[in-house]
Amino acid sequence: MMISLRSETSVLGRWWFTVDRWSLSALFLLIACGAVLALASTPAIAERLGLDPFYFVRRQFALLPVAALSLIAVSMLTPKQVRVLALFGFLAAVAMLALTFFIGVEIKGARRWINLGGFSLQPSEFVKPTFAVLAAWLFARQRRHPGFHGDAIALALFAGVIALVLRQPDVGMALVITVVFMAQYFLAGLRMFWVTLLAAVGIAGGVGAYYVFPHVASRINRFLDPNSGDTYQVNRAQDAFSNGGLFGRGPGEGTVKSVLPDAHSDFVFAVAGEEFGLILCLIIVGLFTFVVLRGFARMLQENDLFVMLAVSGLLTQFGLQALINMGSTLHLMPTKGMTLPFISYGGSSLLAVSLAMGMMLALGRKRFGAGEAA
Amino acid sequence: MATRLSDVLSFLPARLKIEGSAKQTIDVARNRLLVGGIMFALAFLVVGFRVVDLTVINEGREPRLANAHRLTTLEMDRADIVDRNDVLLATSLRTGSLYANPRQLLDPEDAARRLARALPGVNEAELLARFRSERTFVWVKRSLTPRQQAAVNRLGIPGLFFQREERRIYPHGQIAGHITGFTDIDNRGIAGAEQYFDERLRRSNEPVQLAIDIRAQHILREELAHQVAEFRAIGGSAMVMDSNNGEILAMVSLPDFDSNTPALASPEARFNRNTLGVYEMGSTFKVFTFAAALEYGTTNFNAVYDASRPIEIGRFTIHDFRGQNRRLTMPEVFMYSSNIGTVRMAMQFGRERQREFLSRLGLTRAAQFELPEIGPPIVPNPWRDINMMTVAFGHGMAVSPLQLIAAVNASVNGGLMVRPTLLRRPEGAEFPRERVMTAQTSEQMRRLLRLVVERGSARSAAAPGYLVGGKTGTAEKNVRGRYRQNARMSLFAGAFPITAPRYSMLIILDEPQATARTQGFATGGWVAAPMVARLVPRLAALWGLPPMDETQPQVRQQLFVNAALSR
């Protein structure tokens, strides 16, 4: 079968032989982990909200096939198609992001969501991957065609996006977008003078956020000095890991999900630790590491700057989000509301990360011939 | 579009150069990508190590949350209350209280029915109403016994939980109910020592040691109950106090209640007559009139008072009860408890000095004592001559038994006012003593009090060998402004051994009814004094006080009073 497919010229056959099947498998394993943890973590949350225990499970399981399919479908695109998708996706996401200020739904003090027929969508999630691809193209284009002011356009877009996201307010999202953008700019050959300057500006921005946004200040204070305020969630999360040990307490046997309001999203890693133990946690960490590092390693051989910048940007976003989520749960850094890609409950996040990884796979596919990717 | 654009640009001559620069750019990007990859690898490594650290290395560690929780709301067990010999009067027992989360109950009807069957005192309908509420926490029953807890566990109903609690237990429940008081369901002291020492009991691990001797308490209660029953009194109160340091060794108020079940007690039973009740103390007040007169030097043992006819003042007439209707010597006035003679004696020193003297004895202000149930005295205001006359023989002014025993004690112990205390005084501890009369006055009062037991109205109080001295009293109860002849308080106040008092005591019976044996009398001498004769030998045996020969010459000399009217 496999061998016969090698000569296959159908779209599916070509895709199968060009896509990075290792990364694809790792991503599907992550989706499987997410499914199991949705089963473990969401019934307790649903019960606390007075909903049917399997309310969230049903919603997530309805979305998982959609996510998996869109991941595969997007990964079938050519680099050029990816670029077009990113451009229009970006425009649509930014438009919706702007709309949140007019028709947005306020959840937990932030206007990040808009309602789409019973399904609330968080447009900023979609801004992240599409902007990364768009920025990569703009950077790459200027390198190839010096007359084209790609850097300037990218910087302008970046400024606009950050302004919108900060107005939500969503500091975490702004942070991820900024780091990804800067990483791409860095890869694109930004001179070291500017790298140093931007690093300084980044630090200043972080300090600024501490003083400008009270909820940021509060979180950082609590991280630095656990006695300064409520560290209940982080303490509970740490206890969950201690509870779990090597093999965990068994599916459904955890307690952290019944006390942490965000056990299905921001603290889902703690549920994994408590119920499935160190083994599953290491598997999850290992999968994220694998996807990111394998992607990076492949990009070292990449000759097309756009592909390299775009894939690196998407993987940076993916890995950074995973690191921030796990790092907060493990009390390695101040708590930052951030979903764990593919694992956390949440439709927008799941679909957006599927889109991102789909684009990553599509761009990373083997291309025959020395043609420019885009 | 981009491809097309690049095609267009490819015509440019600079293409090769650009190609070269693009190559250079890719190389820079690769190097920098390597840096990024290494940073990611390190970061994931740190996360991995941290997971191992938290799950395996920290496994089984004390949870940090439980630690933090305990630190902030550390709930120590409420401290014990013990008597002077470390006998437990109140202690805490850990129990479990049952509560439910109605949202987790699968079948509220079934749960309510089975719980009502398993636990006494749980009403099925009430429980079901609570189970149907929207709340996530409802009490089912507080303080379950281990057996009941096992029974509830056996029911296997999900959504039921135990809350560890402590319950206050009073091993001597009924005997010392008014002293220990009790706590509410949340273990806050709301009566007696539990309330007065609430802060200390909650904060400290050290037991609160009372001056009470639970054995004496038991004896006193038994004797008083006997007296109350015999004379069908509506109640009674009695106290025994250490004459020297003011420790209250026993304190009984009847009817009483069991501290373990205060809710079952009537308000009358919960009422502590000794500290909260204030009464007109009748002839026992004559002790203070005599002491004042001796102290002010307006009388002496040879003084004579005309008690041949009643004193009329305004619309009042002051009579003697079974009066001698003749001139009486000063000791005779005391011995026969002549109202007329006493009033004449008071008139000699006057109302100002009377008020001043009674104040000195702490009778005009609320007592200071380690119980929250303190009744303030009812003092005449203004203090007119008529008040002076009635107060002289214990009417028109009401004080608590606690105030009375303290004042009587000061009159016999050498003239030192000692504040009564419910707390045991540590050995050799200093405590305030205030001289309120000369030692000589006190010595003369002791002779007079012994005279009453030897030859006066308290003859039945004589406990041979223990040299009891005391004064009886009978007060007509003032009900809604009118004195009722048949409703009276009958009292005995005294001390033993009277030559050098060690214990002072006060016994009061409320509305005792005369019996055939008392020949129709229900006065202090007939109903309160006999109890003293039984009580004193029992207490003396308990405290190792040997009986003595009351006829020894030096004792006779110490107590000699020439009461006879010398003509």
Image (spheres, coloured by chain):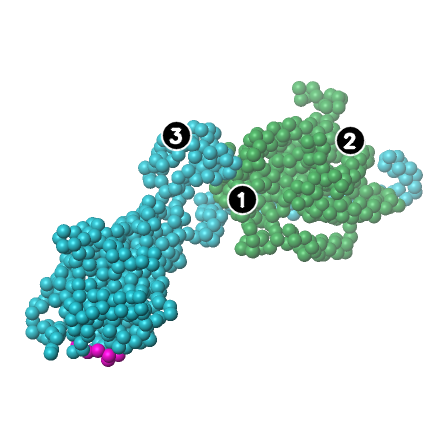
Q: Measuring from the top left, give residue A93's x and y in whole percent.
A: 76, 38
Alpha carbon distance from label 3 to label 1: 38 Å
Three-letter code for the amino acid on which mark 2 is drawn: Thr
- Residue drawn at point x = 19 percent, y = 74 percent: B305
Q: In the image, what residue type sits under mark 1?
A: Ala
Q: With A193 as the anchor, is B277 left or right in this view?
A: left
- The answer to whether marks 3 and 1 mark residues whose Cβ atoms lie closer than 8 Å is no
Q: What residue is disc 1 on?
A: A237
From the viewer's perspective, tell me whether residue B279 is left or right of residue A15.
left
Q: Amino acid at mark 3?
A: Arg
> What numbered label is drawn on residue B216?
none
* Label 1 – label 2 distance at C-alpha: 42 Å
Q: Which residues are magenta?
A: B295-301
**Is residue A56 part of the magenta span, yes or no?**
no
Quadrant containing the C terminus of chain B is bottom left
Compared to residue A210, the image places residue B459 above or below, namely: below
Residue at the image point whose x is 45% and y is 37% from the top:
B100
The colour assigned to chain A within the rendered structure: green
Q: Is residue B162 above or below residue A39?
A: below
Q: Position of residue B347 (x, y in %)?
A: 27, 75
Looking at the rendered structure, the secondary structure element under dot 2 is loop
User: Where's residue B450, x and y in %?
Assistant: 15, 69
For label 3, count other residues whose C-alpha is less than 10 Å away and answer few (under 14), some (14-19) or many (20+): some
**Number of numbered labels in the structure image:** 3
On the same chain, marks 3 and 1? The answer is no
Q: Are marks 3 and 2 on the same chain?
A: no
Question: What numbered label is drawn on residue A78?
Answer: 2
Quarter of the N terminus of chain B within the rendering? top right
Indicate the chain on which mark 2 is placed.
Answer: A
Q: Which residue is mark 3?
A: B114
Mark 1 or mark 2, whichever is nearer to me: 1
In this rendering, the answer to whether B448 lies above or below B270 is: below
